[in-house]
């Protein structure tokens, strides 16, 4: 999969990485059994600290999205991908409403974050 | 736009390792065999059955016919491949390694099975040649690896010309870093290979032939190099490697001419699975039918690797190569 990090963004680097894996799993781009690069490989590839990648991977493991195996890197687990069709439909509806009411994207995400608390 | 492709480099080295050395080995084998003539029985044992009893007899001519005819023919074929389409190191290595390896294997088989018959009155008393076969395989493998290592590498061929503007790109913000990584596994190959290894193990136990376990082990290692490949694209370029670390192919960003997603047909275009050399010297990891990345490199080299989501990988490689070139020209 494609990993990208933007050092200029306000989000910490580990959170950017974790968010991309979550999105890829939710969109079914990453399937069960798929192997992610080892933390060391990914850290070298993106020229970031090894702990940044490990932090992201540990967070994903705690969420049950991936399994970490010694020497074998990270593997996407089976129970990680529930059917998100309903959620995608709701998100599409939310985006359409926000656009219609001309609410800024930042405001919408803040509202969603608060609602999820 | 088709620019004429440059001729493969290191043609003298290719001729020595892939043609001269194998031909000399055949010559030495024939000379040694002829020098032994007075001490050999007539007829000679030329074939052994499964219980290692001689069951075929013939003249010295029958014995050396195969290496004298087949090994040079094979070496000439490998030499022609490396000489005309061996633009990348791996193609030249495989050609030299298989030409030398096969010649050594055949020479050891011939000289070994003659040596056990030296000073025998009757070839029917010839002992088994199980150890000769083992030495032949080990010697052939070792000589092949050595020959491959002697092949000179490609010199770095950086390009400052822009990447083909028609090739796909990824949208990246300034300062944004990106990496792409994906593994391909050949499921069909895994099944076929797994069954072959299992059959070998079962035969080894049933026939009480522990040496077959070595064959099973060697086959397993070979499969590990041929059935799985991890492809990654980042600021260092594209790397495709097997889990064992060999073979590994690297394309540095400054050698990328253009990368594209293509459809690959292993049998139609490459004659099989594994690390393959296809029409026109396109070479690379061909593990299954379907999408893959094709990287046109400097020096007329073309690398292919079968991998899912090839479009993303190819686009990122082009974009990172653009970045590296503009950094090189402005800095």
Image (spheres, rainbow, N blue to C red):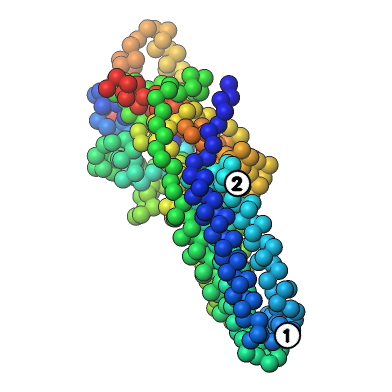
* Residue in the image at 52% along x and 40% along y: B8
Residue at 67% from the left image edge and 65% from the top image edge: B68
Q: Chain of mark 1?
A: B
- CA separation in Å, label 1 and label 2: 40 Å
| Residue drawn at x 52%, y 54% as measured from the top left | B16
**Left or right side of B32 for B324:** left
Image quadrant assignment for residue B65: bottom right
- Number of other residues with Cα within 10 Å of mark 1, as a class: few under 14, some 14 to 19, many 20 or more: some
Q: Is residue B194 above or below residue B167?
A: below
Give the residue at mark 1.
B42
Question: Which label is found at residue B114?
Answer: none
Whether residue B322 sits left or right of residue B67 in the image: it is left
Q: Relative to A86, say whether B266 is above or below.
A: below
Q: Are callouts 1 and 2 both on one chain?
A: yes
Front label number (1 vs 2): 1
Subunit under mark 2: B
Residue drawn at (69%, 74%) of the image: B63
Among numbered discs 1 and 2, the one appearing first in the sequence: 1
A43 relative to B291 in the view: left or right: left
Residue B203 seen in this snapshot: no
Q: Is B215 positioned to the left or the right of A78 in the image?
A: right
Quarter-of-image position of residue B208? bottom right
Q: Residue A11 placed where, x, y %?
A: 26, 27
Look at the image and tell me whether residue B25 can be seen.
yes
What is the count of numbered marks?
A: 2
Mark 2 — residue?
B81
The residue lying toward the viewer, choosing from B309 and B254, is B254
Q: Position of residue B203 (x, y in %)?
A: 62, 74
x and y percent of residue B128 in the render?
63, 84
What crowding class fits label 2: few (fewer than 14 Cα within 10 Å), some (14-19), or many (20 or more)?
many
């Amino acid at each position: 999969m494609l990993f990208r990090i933007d050092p200029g963004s306000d989000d910490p680097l580990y959170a950017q990485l974790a968010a991309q894996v979550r999105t890829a799993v939710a969109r079914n781009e990453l399937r069960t059994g798929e192997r992610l690069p080892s933390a060391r490989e990914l850290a070298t590839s993106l020229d970031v600290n090894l702990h940044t990648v490990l932090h992201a991977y540990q967070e994903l493991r705690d969420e049950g999205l991936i399994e970490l195996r010694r020497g074998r890197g990270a593997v996407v687990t089976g129970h990680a991908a529930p059917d998100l069709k309903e959620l995608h439909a709701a998100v599409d509806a939310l985006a359409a409403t926000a656009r219609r009411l001309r609410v800024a994207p930042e405001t919408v995400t803040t509202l969603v974050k608060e609602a999820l608390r | 736009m088709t620019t004429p492709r440059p001729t493969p480099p290191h043609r003298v080295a290719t001729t020595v390792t892939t043609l001269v050395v194998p031909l000399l080995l055949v010559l030495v084998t024939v000379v040694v065999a002829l020098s032994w003539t007075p001490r050999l029985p007539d007829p000679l044992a030329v074939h052994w059955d499964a219980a290692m009893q001689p069951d075929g007899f013939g003249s010295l001519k029958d014995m050396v016919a195969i290496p004298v005819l087949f090994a040079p023919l094979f070496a000439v074929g490998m030499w022609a491949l490396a000489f005309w389409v061996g633009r990348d190191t791996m193609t030249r290595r495989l050609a030299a390694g298989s030409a030398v390896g096969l010649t050594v294997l055949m020479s050891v088989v011939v000289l070994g099975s003659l040596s056990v018959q030296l000073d025998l009155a009757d070839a029917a008393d010839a002992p088994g040649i199980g150890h000769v076969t083992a030495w032949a395989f080990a010697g052939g493998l070792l000589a092949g690896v050595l020959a491959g290592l002697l092949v000179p590498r490609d010199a770095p061929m950086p390009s400052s010309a822009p990447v083909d503007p028609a090739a796909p790109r990824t949208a990246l913000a300034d300062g944004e870093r990106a990496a792409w990584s994906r593994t391909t596994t050949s499921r069909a190959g895994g099944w076929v290979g797994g069954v072959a290894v299992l059959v070998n193990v079962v035969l080894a136990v049933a026939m009480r032939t522990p040496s077959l376990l070595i064959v099973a082990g060697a086959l397993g290692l070979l499969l590990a190099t041929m059935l799985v490949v991890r492809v990654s694209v980042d600021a260092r370029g594209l790397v495709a490697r097997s889990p064992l670390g060999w073979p590994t192919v690297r394309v540095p960003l400054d050698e990328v001419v253009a990368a594209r997603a293509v459809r690959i047909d292993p049998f139609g275009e490459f004659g099989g699975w594994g690390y393959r050399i296809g029409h026109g010297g396109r070479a690379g990891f061909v593990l299954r039918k379907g999408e893959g990345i094709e990287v046109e490199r400097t020096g007329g080299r073309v690398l292919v690797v079968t991998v899912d989501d090839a479009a993303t990988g190819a686009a990122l490689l082009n974009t990172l190569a653009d970045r590296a070139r503009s950094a090189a020209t402005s800095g």
